Image (tube, rainbow, N blue to C red):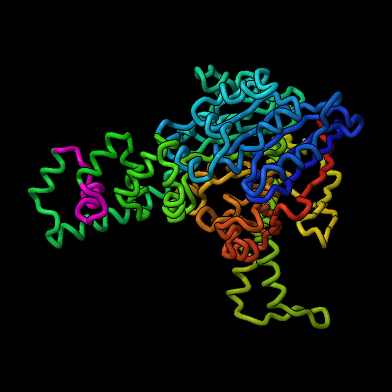
């Protein structure tokens, strides 16, 4: 039986993200595995550097970072990576592969943020950007491919790994991309044993999501306007045929007739490589054709258009949720899906049983050895029948557990939460019933139904064991969905105290409270949030 200690830390870096997980055997603290998710801050890069130095040893005892996962290529999530590489021995970096069109959007964001040379270079030439750093030539870059619609590739019972080749270590990695990464892996693969063979008890599952929900949301408005314009006669049948023959979409026609873009501007943007989806998004959120041309030209010629930066920042503020086409989420949790799935189902049935039983008790009273019914007999009879039916379900579940020989792969010995988010009111408490799975979401857009359902379906078997979630995009209301939250879930928000975006949103904090989640806001002023978890693995 192995005894493992996991220390999961949400570091105080302000408007950014720096999260670490450290595994060590309780018999040998020197035998460690270190994992990092995101490493950056726009509040001050010095906050990240300070946390790196506090967390990891340097010099002769320089520590290894077995894997770094990057959610997306924004300054506030990656500008601390050069400091991390300088301070530690980083072995692998996982990052989301993005399209050329997405790179154009990122370049615009970099201009607005005044991004570092490293961040700008990493967008186009990741391998070169890393190699130019001291010690970077020893790091392996692994690009996580965009999700193509399939669910998790390797979930199932862990007894038979041969039928799950993507769960067997190095096999999860494919060929690299020249100048981009040494190797690639598919979204949904468990990469744990590709990181270290010693992580055979754990799962790290990244998903590189392409976020299109906002474009789709704008499409509804386009269809409505198109029909409206046709009825009003603003789009004639002749014009419709003319535009169709010229390869112009209905969305573009709506924008043209609505005066939001001219034909000249449309041709210019198409020539510059702006896609139909991007055009729908930009124009759909109120950016005019002229403004879009300014953004594109500035992105392609940043040195020439420095005077446009202030204007661009004003334009950018109109984007709900920001310019972010991809976000790579990461699930971190134990390999015990069958047990958790069964336990969750059993708990659900048990809750139903207790609820119905309570109704019967409420309607009956015992007096001198006899029971008296306060309520319609037929209703009480129905309740009794329902209770007996649920009891039968519980017995069936217990038999299934016995037949499948399911047994716990691990026991939770202890869990300590150290809440230092408020520097003046530090808390340390025990949470023995804590679920230890964690979902890191980066800036994932969970607000809209389709993107939310996609996230849920991809991590279907993880939800029952989820005890911690990083709330998307620093607590922005444009990325949040209340349905993510469940009772007792630790909801962590990273945000700067003066960030200019009103992060976190009061609506998000209220939504977490409404669903009985536990909200922790980690800023640059507190001491962060740490979960120290002791686990005994049975095999």
Q: Position of residue 440 (x, y in %)?
A: 63, 43
Q: Quick check: 352 above or below 8?
A: below
Looking at the picture, how far across and down is residue 192, in whole percent? 68, 28
Quarter holding residue 264: top left
Image coordinates for residue 38, horizontal then vertical, percent? 64, 39
Q: Residue at x 61, y 18 (%)?
A: 171
Q: Residue furthest left?
A: 238
Horizontal side of 186 relative to 275 (left or right) equals right
**Residue 7 quadrant:** top right
Q: Quadrant of the N terminus?
A: top right
- Seen in the picture, residue 136 relative to 68 is either above or below; the reply is above
Viewer-proximal residue, 99 or 363? 99
Residue shown at 78%/36% (left/top)? Answer: 22
In this orientation, does residue 47 appear? yes
In this rendered view, identify the residue nearer to me: 231 or 296: 296
Q: Is residue 258 in the magenta section? A: yes
Instruction: Please give the name of the residue rendered at 76% of the width and 42% of the height, measured from the top-left corner.
Output: 51
Q: Quadrant of the C terminus?
A: top right
Q: Which residues are magenta?
A: 246-262
Q: Does residue 16 belong to the magenta stretch?
A: no
């Amino acid at each position: 039986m192995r005894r493992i200690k996991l220390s999961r830390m949400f570091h105080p870096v302000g408007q950014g993200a720096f999260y670490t997980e450290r595994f060590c055997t309780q018999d040998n603290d020197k035998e460690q595995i270190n994992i990092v998710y995101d490493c950056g801050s726009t509040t001050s890069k010095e906050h990240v550097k300070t946390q790196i130095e506090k967390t990891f040893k340097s010099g002769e005892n320089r520590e290894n970072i077995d894997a770094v996962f990057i959610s997306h290529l924004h300054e506030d999530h990656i500008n601390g990576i050069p400091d991390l590489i300088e301070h530690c021995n980083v072995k692998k970096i996982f990052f989301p592969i993005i399209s050329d069109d997405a790179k154009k959007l990122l370049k615009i964001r970099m201009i607005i943020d005044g991004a570092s040379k490293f961040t700008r270079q990493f967008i186009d030439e990741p391998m070169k950007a890393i190699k130019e750093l001291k010690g970077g030539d020893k790091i392996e870059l692994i690009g996580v491919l965009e999700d193509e619609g399939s669910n998790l590739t390797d979930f199932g019972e862990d007894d038979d790994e041969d039928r799950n080749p993507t769960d067997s270590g190095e096999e999860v990695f494919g060929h690299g991309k020249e100048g981009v990464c040494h190797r690639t892996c598919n979204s949904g693969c468990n990469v744990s044993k590709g990181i270290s063979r010693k992580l055979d008890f754990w799962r790290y599952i990244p998903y590189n999501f392409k976020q299109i929900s906002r474009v789709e949301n704008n499409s509804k408005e386009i269809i409505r306007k198109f029909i409206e314009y046709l009825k009003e006669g603003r789009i004639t049948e002749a014009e419709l045929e003319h535009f169709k023959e010229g390869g112009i979409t209905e969305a573009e026609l709506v924008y043209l007739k609505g005066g939001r873009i001219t034909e000249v501007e449309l041709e210019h943007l198409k020539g510059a490589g702006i896609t139909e989806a991007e055009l729908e998004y930009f124009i759909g959120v109120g950016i005019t054709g002229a403004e879009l041309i300014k953004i594109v030209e500035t992105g392609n010629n940043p040195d020439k258009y420095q005077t446009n930066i202030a204007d661009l920042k004003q334009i950018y503020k109109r984007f709900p949720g920001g310019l972010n086409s991809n976000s790579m989420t990461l699930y971190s949790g134990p390999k015990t899906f069958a047990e958790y799935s069964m336990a969750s189902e059993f708990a659900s049935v048990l809750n139903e049983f207790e609820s119905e039983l309570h109704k019967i008790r409420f309607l009956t009273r015992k007096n001198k050895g006899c029971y008296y019914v306060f309520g319609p007999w037929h209703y009480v009879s129905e309740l009794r029948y329902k209770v007996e039916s649920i009891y039968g379900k519980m017995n069936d579940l217990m038999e299934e557990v016995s037949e499948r020989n399911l047994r716990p792969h691990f026991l939770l010995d202890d869990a300590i939460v150290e809440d230092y988010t408020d520097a003046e009111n530090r808390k340390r408490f025990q949470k023995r019933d804590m679920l230890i799975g964690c979902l890191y979401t980066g800036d994932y857009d969970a607000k809209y139904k389709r993107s939310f359902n996609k996230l849920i379906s991809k991590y279907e078997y993880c939800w029952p064991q989820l005890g911690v979630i990083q709330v998307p995009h620093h607590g922005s209301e444009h990325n949040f969905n209340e349905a993510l939250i469940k009772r007792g879930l630790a909801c962590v928000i990273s945000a700067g105290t003066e960030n200019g975006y009103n992060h976190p949103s009061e609506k998000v904090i209220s939504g977490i409270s409404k669903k009985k989640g536990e909200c922790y806001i980690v800023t640059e002023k507190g001491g962060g949030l740490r979960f120290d978890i002791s686990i005994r693995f049975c095999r």
